[in-house]
Image: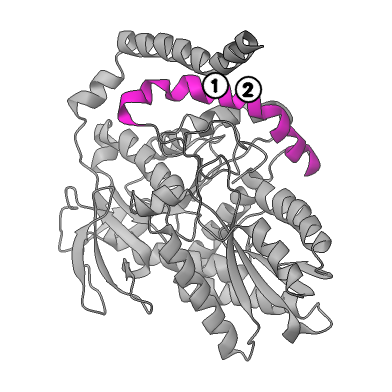
Amino acid sequence: MDAAACSRVLPHINLSHSDHRLSTGRSGPAFFRSSKRLLVPKQLTVSCSAPIDKGNDMFGVSHCSKKNPVGEVLCPAGVCTYGGTAVESHSHAAEEKVGVLLLNLGGPETLNDVQPFLFNLFADPDIIRLPRLFRFLQQPLAKLISVLRAPKSKEGYAAIGGGSPLRKITNDQANELRKTLESKDLPVNVYVGMRYWYPFTEEAVQQIKKDRITRLVVLPLYPQFSISTTGSSVRVLQDIFRKDAYLSRMPVSIINSWYQREGYIKSMADLISKELESFSEPAEVMIFFSAHGVPLSYVEDAGDPYKDQMEECIFLIMKELKSRGINNEHTLAYQSRVGPVQWLKPYTDEVLVELGQKGVKSLLAVPVSFVSEHIETLEEIDMEYRELALESGIENWGRVPALGCTPSFITDLADAVIEAVPLATAMSTPQTTSEVADHDPVRYAIKMFFGSFLAFILFFSPMIMAFRNT
């Protein structure tokens, strides 16, 4: 997450991921079109190569699952489909217009975007997880935090050129994915939807509807699943689709995670082995995996599989490296923690100091949570952690670049999409009475008034007490 964006503001609030920023009213969703159509059989057959367990995940998504090499239950290929109305079966192939929706967090493109981006970030209930009784405080608190954190966060973005490159990189990935799928005889429209900045997921979905897409594959650009990344984006999609008659009937397949795919693992191993060669003594280099952290409560209380998936991801990458004769020592740590709550350990900054004290002289940093360059790689790792490592006694520093548009990586994403297309089923969850009530404008105005008043009191009461004591 963007550590500069939201460091240590509220003492009792769980904060999570962000490379992310916001604003209002700008260009619409980035998408890449193909006028061709695809013939896809509507007869859906779901099969697994291993014994499976059927069940629902935290989002009501039905899937088949199997044990991975370290005992974790996974969806095969990470593909999950909604347990709604299945696509009507036909004995013949029907004409389909396939879309692929890439999901990412988004990021401010200018310094003026930083504060509104932060508001969008902290207004997400999957980022600041308030008890149900206090959820009316969500937006007032988001406004307060975003105003307080904007100046510090702007410094970080100024250091990397004045804005996040995430949108451009994601657009490039979308374009390369479209071309690769076309080369594999699957013409598609590829759309980009950001969670906290332009082009917002809502904009991308409206374009999907306008283009009359008949089958959709949702591909979050997060290798591992977390409540605060893929989970948050899927929740937004569910809300949009259930309120729209056309969208609720559209067959959808969501690739919840893909860290265990062979193509991804080999692409990561390729980048690591290449960077190791830049050291004078490659065999002596410590491979340092730095993953984005999440609050410990996400894992222990909410059942977030992120930690288990991350550990298995590292296991698979190192297994691939060892098969190539690379037997370097390695370690995993978690970066970007904020606030006073406990996050996943060990922490990246603390481990770097410990490694220096133990005499490690050469270190290769591997940003394993990210497939695109953004503030957490360009500023947090390349600047903050590099400086800390050198101060701690590490003499030779290197960093593996994010996968970006690496051809083998894009090819593997294309294969994942092809595998997911025939598994799509429709979302048809009806909107509940409580959800309708949440959109009542009178109710909303009352919540905002009292929420803003309470947030004001909570923020200024320590100052008032200190003044009285003085």
**Which image quadrant for residue 369?**
bottom right
Please tell me which residue is depicted at 70% across the width and 63% down the height of the picture.
352
Instruction: List x then y, in percent, for residue 250.
Output: 27, 45
Residue under label 2, please give it: 147
> Does residue 347 show up magenta in the picture?
no
Element class at badge 1 = helix
Task: Determine whether 276 is above or below 420 in the image.
Answer: below
Magenta stretch, main secondary structure, is: helix
Displayed quadrant of residue 43: bottom left
* Residue 24 in sight in this render: no
Q: Residue 389: give x, y in percent of width and height.
A: 77, 62
Pointer 1 residue: 143
Residue drawn 73% across the image and 56% down it:
385
The stretch in magenta equals 131-160
Question: As drawn, is 190 to the left or to the right of 299?
Answer: right
Q: Position of 323 compared to 123: left or right?
A: right
Task: Label 2, secondary structure: give it.
Answer: helix
Q: Is residue 17 left or right of residue 212?
A: right
Q: Amino acid at mark 2?
A: Val
Quadrant assignment for the C terminus: top right
